[in-house]
Image: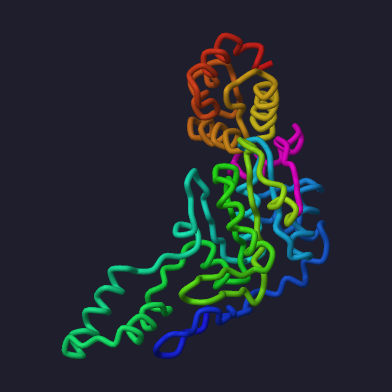
Amino acid sequence: MTSEPAAGGTAAGTARTASSAGPDLSSVSSPAKLSALLAGIGYLADDGVATAAFLSLRMGKPLFCEGEPGTGKTSLAVALSESLELPLVRLQCHEGIDAAQALYEWDFPRQLLHLRALEAAEGGRLDVDAAEQSLYTERFLLARPLLTALRSSPCVLLVDEIDRADDEFEAFLLQLLDENTVTIPEYGEVRAAQPPLVVLTSNRTREVHDALKRRCLYHWLEHPDLSREIAILRARVPGIGQRLAEQIAETLQRLRTMELLKPPGVAEALDWANALRALGRDELDAASAATTLGAVLKFSEDLDRVRTRLDAVLG
């Protein structure tokens, strides 16, 4: 954790370095070993994903994962956290996100109470300079995800759906990605002793600025091929048989070739498998598919389109 400032605070510009305690990651010596760790918790990474994640870990560079929704971008960050036994810190981006939501805020109500207490203790004669200095200390600092990640290093920092944020927020991230530091004007600079493993995800709803991408390793995630999707279903859905896994994966592959508003991803494949298992189904037929399509398709237009061609979709 960031060191507690001395009484009266610390001058702005002072660097505070977080603790470097954490698990030993030196045993992760190759993409194959990282892939095995991920597989151990149910995330089946292909060679490209495993190599990109390994290089990000080894080189200390952020990993920028882009791809269609449902290709496992967010799940990769979660799986890295679990398999490497590192805490996960998640920043969910959205339109209009700013530094106060992503980095820190000052606890204004507590600061106000503190000022009133000082004023009462000093009989109404407040030393303004001393009071102001005492306000901007650790006790009044509310850490948001980015600051939490630096103070919790090493950890996995997931900056999810960066394409939802705006250009100004991307520019704000550059110092953190470049130097693993953030600057709080009233408080000083906070620096991670060990860089967090940063994973940024994008659904490519807009182009992210080149300045951000240049600081990252880039990987485009595709939907899994048939054999990998079958393996994912067998690994992640308790009790599912080979036949049902094959039928679901084959159907998902066909659905992704259709002009749907939202093609289903791996998450939908898992939901469908779990729904069918909850109904006690060991095979996928037209009747069970028709009643459970809501686990896979999320728009009425897609449901109508698929239902009119259900026999062909099921193969």
Residue depicted at 21% across the width and 79% down the height: 116
Query: Is 275 drawn above or below residue 186 in the view shown?
Result: above
Query: Is 84 drawn above or below residue 95 in the view shown?
Result: below
Q: Position of residue 2 (x, y in %)?
A: 52, 79
Q: Is residue 83 visible?
A: no
Query: The C terminus is located in which quarter?
Result: top right
Query: Is 130 drawn above or below residue 310 in the view shown?
Result: below
Q: Which is nearer the eye, 141 or 81?
A: 141
What colouring method underlies this structural image?
rainbow
Residue depicted at 22% across the width and 82% down the height: 117
Q: Quadrant of residue 26?
A: bottom right
Residue 21 is inside the magenta segment: no
Which stretch did the figure color magenta? 217-240
**Count of number-bearing discs:** 0
Q: Is residue 248 visible?
A: yes
Would residue 84 be found to the left or right of residue 238 on screen?
right
Q: Position of residue 305 (x, y in %)?
A: 56, 13
Would residue 67 be found to the left or right of residue 143 on screen?
right
